[in-house]
Image (spheres, rainbow, N blue to C red):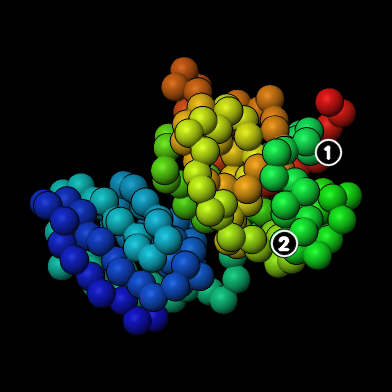
Amino acid sequence: MNARLHRCGEHAVLVELGRLEEVVALYDALAADPPRGIVDLVPAARTLLVRFEPPARHAEVESAVLAARPAGGRRVTTEEVVIPVVYDGDDLADVARLTGLTEREVVAAHTGTAWTVAFCGFAPGFGYLIGGDARLAVPRRTESRVRVPTGAVGLAGEFSGVYPRESPGGWQLIGRTETVVWDIAADPPALLRPGVRVRFAEALP
């Protein structure tokens, strides 16, 4: 693991890594066996923020991070979420064209493989899902939309995701869901958290 460590304030260390796969593996290793004092792990595309509380200190946490031995694959998680999707997105035909699949094959590919939340960002409750069918890797739209509706299901690069609220966005939209992925009154508020497995299921309009 080739990592660069940066101290962030009094109670955090930012671990900078080269690839998302390294972030996911380190997150899993530390989440499975948290070193003393670590209270939160916040993964991103190339970094992992490690938050801790006293009596732990920066040097102790840094040593624990560097001593971690990430496994090659994701650890098994017992938490799985099934999200019903109506596949009638505005970009479904474009995704089919970009991938060389039919629209029905796009749906079959999206529902046929379990995804995993790698990290969250962009908006509260927006999970970046990885591990799906590699044929669905498509570029973002050349022009972002001013409004993407709540519950829109999209693709961008290797990721899939569900928009937690109405917002601008540039992902390729393939469907929509009624599943609430961000609810401030829930515990926890985010349905899609790092490590959670997600299966999409086709729903009737």
Kindly report which numbered mark, 1 or 2, lies closer to the viewer in this rendering.
2
Q: Is residue 160 visible?
A: no
x 51%, y 30%: residue? 147
Q: Which residue, as the protein is rendered here, is positioned at the far bottom?
A: 2
The one nearer the camera, 20 or 150, is 150
Please say whether residue 101 is visible from this viewpoint: yes
Label 1 Cα crowd, 10 Å radius (few <14 / some 14-19 / many 20+): some
List the single residue furthest toward the left. Answer: 10
Q: For the N terminus, give its image quadrant.
A: bottom left
Alpha-carbon neighbours of circle 2 within 10 Å: few (<14), some, or many (≥20)? some
Above or below, 200 against 10 in this view is above
Q: Which mark is residue 193?
A: none
Q: Which amino acid type corresponds to the residue marked 2 in the rendered image?
A: Leu
State the image coordinates of residue 60 (x, y, percent, origin top left).
19, 66
**Three-letter code, disc 1:** Glu
Name the disc covering residue 98, or none: 2
Residue at the image point whose x is 40% and y is 56% from the top: 44
> Is 85 drawn above or below residue 156 in the view shown?
above
Q: Which residue is mark 1?
A: 202
SS state under label 1? strand
> Left of 103 or right of it: where is 56?
left
- Does 8 sit left or right of 41 as displayed? left
Of the 4 image quadrants, the one containing the C terminus is top right
Instruction: From this view, report whether residue 201 is shown above or below residue 21.
Output: above
C-alpha separation, residue under disc 1 versus residue under disc 2: 21 Å
Q: Position of residue 135 (x, y in %)?
A: 74, 66
Q: Identify the residue shown where x is 65% and y is 42%.
A: 173
